[in-house]
Image (cartoon, rainbow, N blue to C red):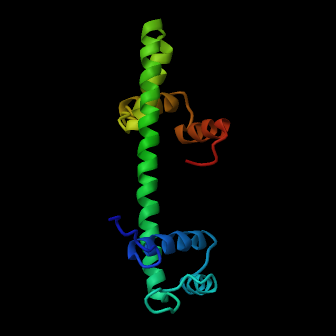
Amino acid sequence: MTARKPDPRKDSKIITERRQEKVAKLMIYGLTSREIADQLATEDVINPDTGLPWSVETIRLDQKAVERKWKASTKASVETHRARQLAEVARVKRDAWEMKNHAVILSALSHEAKLTDTAAPLRINLSLVSDWWDAIERLGHNPETVLKAMIAELGVQQL
């Protein structure tokens, strides 16, 4: 005796998956829930239990499910991409250590710190800034004017 194959038109999980695939495609085109429901009806994608078009509420639930899937996929893709990048940086670091190439090692460490968000925050030595400010004043210049001129020289619009 052979097992009965499920009727894809009657299996609710398959019906939901196929409908959500079509909903996802139509979402990408920017259609509203109402427009998606209408489009599915014109394609004879209807509720097999009632023979009627799918309700706008069902389509909205499908849209939420599709968005959850997209977000989960994006998170997984980003994490996979980051993991691959870290593996590549680790390989570059190993090769650089073998070749005793300190510049490449430092560059790899910098990339690794950025990818893992472990780079040390920028620290400003305020006493150094104060000493600089005082030295500019001793020379008879306005430190604020000097600083603005330096920023303009760098081509920076405004801090």
Quadrant (top left, top right, bottom left, bottom right) of the N terminus: bottom left
Question: Residue placed farthest to the left in the image?
Answer: 1
Residue shown at 46% from the left, 23% from the top: 108
Question: Residue placed farthest to the front in the image?
Answer: 1
Q: Is residue 1 found left or right of 99 in the rendered image?
A: left
Residue shown at 35% from the left, 35% from the top: 118
Residue 55 x %, y % = 48, 89
Res. 106 visible in picture: no
Q: In the image shown, does 144 or 138 lie closer to the viewer?
A: 144
The image shows residue 74, relative to residue 30, as above or below, that is above
The image shows residue 19, relative to residue 131, as above or below, that is below
Q: In the image shown, does 111 or 62 lie closer to the viewer?
A: 62
Residue 57 x %, y % = 44, 87
The image shows residue 81, relative to residue 108, as above or below, that is below
Q: Is residue 39 found left or right of 59 in the rendered image?
A: right
Residue 56 x %, y % = 49, 88
